[in-house]
Amino acid sequence: MWNKVPYGKRKGHIRQYKVEYTEVASNYTQIREVGDKTRHLMVVDLKKNAHYTIKVSAATIKGYGPASQPLSVLTEQDLPSAPPQIVRAMNKTSTSILITWYEVPFGQKNGHILSYNVTYRLVKQNVTTTKQIEAPTLQVNLTGLRANTNYSITVMASTIKGHGPASPAIYVSTQNEGQ
């Protein structure tokens, strides 16, 4: 929302307004023009958790005048739109598995990653356990597992808004007892 240009600063009849909004990280600017009676504009399809600057300028028949001071805004966070990448598992002992992963791709984090949920399930039974790992940690050693048992493992990242999608399941077996 913006105010009319004060009469003393006008150089003729205001015909329209130009709203420029720039995503700071990419320096990508979009422009919307609206009529002279409009004093607000709903901007949609902005990136989540992104910093934007917004400027407004008024136009007369001679063209656009100077832009307003930039307004700095940060869009809200959202759920991650992609899972953590390259999830790997290595059986360390007969009762433990080391799980590692890479972060959610930058443009799909949609906020500050607070934690990761590592879910592991015995494949032949429907027994599921989830461990929450605080970010920025990108690994966990699952212990107390059954020997010579096949596990299905997924990892998902969370922002303040909740959990994103789970990674594709990977499968790994613990070693035989005594190995």
Image (spheres, rainbow, N blue to C red):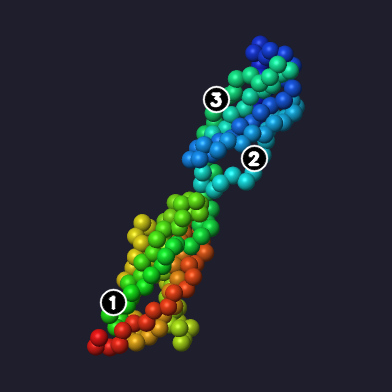
Q: Are marks 3 and 2 in contact (CB under 8 Å)?
A: no
What residue would you read off at disc 3? Answer: 69
The amino acid type found where label 3 is placed reads Gln
Amino acid carrying label 2: it is Val
The answer to whether 69 appears left or right of 176 in the picture is right
Which residue is disc 2 drawn over?
43
Q: Position of residue 167 (x, y in %)?
A: 48, 67
Q: Residue at x 49, y 67 (%)?
A: 166
Q: Which residue: 64% across, 44% down?
A: 44
> 46 left or right of 105?
right
Question: Mark 3: few, some, or many residues within 10 Å (few <14, many ≥20)?
Answer: few
Furthest residue in direction left, as rendered: 178
SS category of the residue bearing label 1: strand
Determine which quarter of the picture holds residue 138. bottom left
Tell us which disc is closer to us: 1 or 2: 1
Instruction: Check disc 1 and give the amino acid type.
Output: Lys
Q: Residues within 10 Å of mark 2 (few under 14, many from 20)?
A: few
Q: Quadrant of residue 39?
A: top right
Q: CA distance from mark 1 to mark 2?
A: 52 Å
Q: Secondary structure at mark 2?
A: loop
Is residue 58 visible from the viewing direction of this image?
yes
Residue 146, position as x, y percentages in the image: 34, 85
* Distance from Cα at disc 3 to Cα at disc 2: 18 Å
For the point 61% across and 32% down, the residue is 20
Q: On the rendered structure, is 177 left or right of 47?
A: left
- Report which residue position mark 1 lands on: 92
Residue 154 drawn above or below residue 33: below
Q: How many marks?
A: 3
Residue at 61% across / 36% down in the picture? 30
